[in-house]
Structure formats: structure tokens, C-alpha cells
Image (spheres, rainbow, N blue to C red):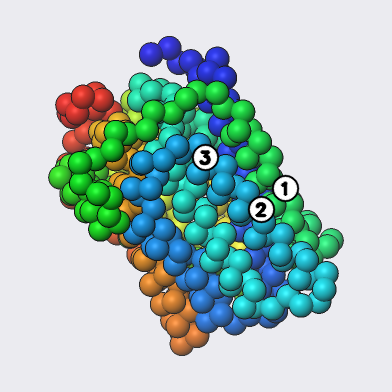
Amino acid sequence: MARGALWSHTDFLRLWSAQSVSAFGARITRTCLPLAAVLTIHASPAALGLLTALALGPGTIVGLFAGGFVDRSRRRHILIAADLLRAAILLTLPIAAWLHMLAMPQLILVAAIAGGFSVLFDIADHAYLPSLIGKEHLVEGNTKLNVTDSVAEIGGPALAGVLVQLLTAPIAIAANAATYVISAFFLSRIATRETIAAPEAEPASWLRDLSTGATAIFRDRLVQPLFWMGAATPLFGSFFLLYVPFAIRDLRLSPTLLGITIGVGGIGAMAGAALAAPVSRWLGLGPAIVTMSFAGAGFTMLVPLASGGVVMATAMLMTAQFCGDAVMVIVIILAASLRQTVLPNDILGRVAAVFQAAAGLCGVVGALTAGAIASALGVRETLLIAACGYFLPPAIALLSPLKALKSLPNPDGAHAH
């Protein structure tokens, strides 16, 4: 395959443009929702845990029901609808703020509904990419999309911090609604026709769809460990809902400085995206996943250990963001490309749905647990528990066949060692 071939793929460039715009705006919302809860409503750790849990909960529900729907539908149409519906629900926040009616129940409801449509978008997107560009271009495609995510990670949170400080968090969220509309426009311009899978002999059933996805996961010795890693990560990752109040209340960072600090992670993620293919060739694909996962867990430890005044604490957080995001993006790119390569296109939606359902359920459990632990032990102590838990995914990878996988298997299913 010629490197950089997707630069001449017009429809991929349209998809890339759509995801670039929505990714940027999504970072604004991700930063602004907890800031709105902390600064506007003065939410407690338990309330933040509930907010995060209800934002993640729809992922479980959508994962249970959406996989077969995605595989039997035109995935581009699903992406467009998810964009427009997210824009509509987010616009209710600045309207409520303008009417002086914004309250925690609305933040929770908006987070839940937008979260559900985001999961549907992610499932459809994961299943759509291989059919648009072909499996031979997946590493390049996933790398380009992750570079864009990295740029959004740099600019989105920093801009969100400035907007929150100059305006308010709800007004800043309005910017994200516009980005989803622009994303839908780019998606509508894709000309490649999709081929929908032929109807199956048995009638559609969400239980049967779930079983199909789960069976595909657990029958493949390379995908199965990716599933357990994908479940363990949000279990402890959702503890980091406490990152914002920890940085603002305990470490005394301003919203602008916090946004810049989070944005540094985007620079690291962009570096990681550029290094994914070289690192995979140097270490081997499986060893790269194992090694980079352990490195990411190690850098995460810097977050709960941050101390020593605003300058020192900010430096530690920025190091965790830059280095941690760099190595974890490598894992994300390689794991996604592996999953899309070894599994057939016509079940990718159902497999992604099972991944999302498990991640959503674990995220809900983690968020509620984090809120309870933080109320009992403190925010820093809870983040330390989460950082220790981040060593579980790389341990799973180390004990699996992934550690011996040298390169992406051929699309016909032959695993390379």
C-alpha cells in the first residue's frame, strides 16, 4: 500500500473534515459540562459522579440495541442524524441559561441524551470506515482521524477554558451545537454508495444481535483481550470525572490554565498518532499495545501525585497529559485497526455495540463508585485508586496472545506472528 494514499480519497477527506469539526466542538462540551456543574451549580463529588454516570449510561443501552440496527442500515445516514440530534439537545443549555432556568437536572438530562447519540455515532463510525476506505488503509485512516482528535484536544479544552472565564459554560457549549451541524453537512457530501448486508434468514432481534457481536468477540483470541481492556479502562477512567474539581479546588488552577493543561494532552496525542505506525513496526503490533499501555498507566500516576504549588502541580499535570495521551493514542489506533481488520465488515456494528455496552456499564459503575469513595476518602485518594487501576488493561494484554502479534493480520484472517 502506498503511504498517504487517502490524501486523494475525496470521500475520506469529507469524513475526516466532518470528524475534525465535531471532535473540536465535543472537547468544548466535555470540558464545559463539569465546569458548568462545578462553577455554576457548585456540584459535589457525588453529584459529579451522578452526572458522569448518566452521561455514560446511555452507552450501555445503545450498545444493547443499536448494533444490528447499524449493520442493517446506511451508516452514513446514522452519522448525520446523530450529529443533528446532538446539536439540538445541546442548544437547550444556553437557552435555559439565558432564561435563568439552568439546573443540575437539565445538565444530567442533556449529558445523558447527548451521550447516547455520541455512542450511536461511534458505533456507526467504527463500522463505516472500513467500507469507505478498505481494510488495507485502516492504519492510515485511523491515524489521520486520531491526529485530528489530537488537534481538537489541544484547542478545544483551552478554548473552552477561555470561553468559560469570559462568558459562561452553558454559552460556550453553544459552539459545539454549531460544529455538529457543520459535521452533518460534510457527511452529506460523501458520494460513495454503501452496500447494506443482505437480510438474514432469521428475524432481527436485539438479543440475537448482541449474541452475534459477543460470539465474534469471544471466538477471536486477539479481539477478546481488546474487549476486556476496553471494559477495564472506563471502569477506572470514569474516576477522572474528579479531575476538574481536583485541579480547580485542590491545586488552585484557573479555568483557563486548566484548559491549557488539558490541551497539552492534545499535543502529546498528535505525537502519538504520528508515532503509531513506526512504533508498531519497531516493537511489533502486539508488544507495542502492551508496552504503551503500561507506559500510559505510569504517566497517569502523576495526576494524584501532583502537588507543590500551582507551578509544580501544573507541570506534573501537563507531563501526565502530554506523555500519557501520546502513548495511549498509539494503543487506540493499533487496537481499532486490529479489530477492524480481523472481523468481517457486516458485523462490525454489532461488535462495536458490545464494546460500547460493556464500556458504558463499567463507566457507570466507576463513576458512581468514584463519587462515593471521594465523599468518604477525598478526591486525591480516589484519583490514586484510579491510577493504580490503570495497570489492569496492560496486564490483560500481557497475559494474552497479543504480546506475540508482530503485525496486522491479513484481512482473510491469517494471524501474523
CB contact under 8 Å: marks 2 and 1: yes
Q: Earlier in the sequence, mark 3 or mark 2?
A: 3
Question: Which amino acid type corresponds to the residue marked 1 in the rendered image?
Answer: Ala
Q: Residue at x 58, y 71 (%)?
A: 109
User: Around disc 2, counting alpha carbons within 10 Å, would you say few (fewer than 14), some (14 to 19), or many (20 or more)?
Assistant: many
| Location of mark 3 (residue) | 77
Q: Secondary structure at mark 2?
A: helix
**Distance CA(mark 3)–CA(mark 2):** 16 Å
Q: What percent of the width, then of the height, locates residue 58?
A: 45, 64
Q: Earlier in the sequence, mark 2 or mark 1?
A: 2
Front: mark 3 or 1: 3
Q: Secondary structure at mark 3?
A: helix
Q: Picture quarter containing residue 132?
A: top left
Q: Residue at x 38, y 48 (%)?
A: 69
Which numbered tag is attached to residue 87?
Answer: 2
Q: Earlier in the sequence, mark 3 or mark 1?
A: 3
User: Around disc 1, counting alpha carbons within 10 Å, would you say few (fewer than 14), some (14 to 19), or many (20 or more)?
Assistant: some
Which numbered tag is attached to residue 178?
Answer: 1
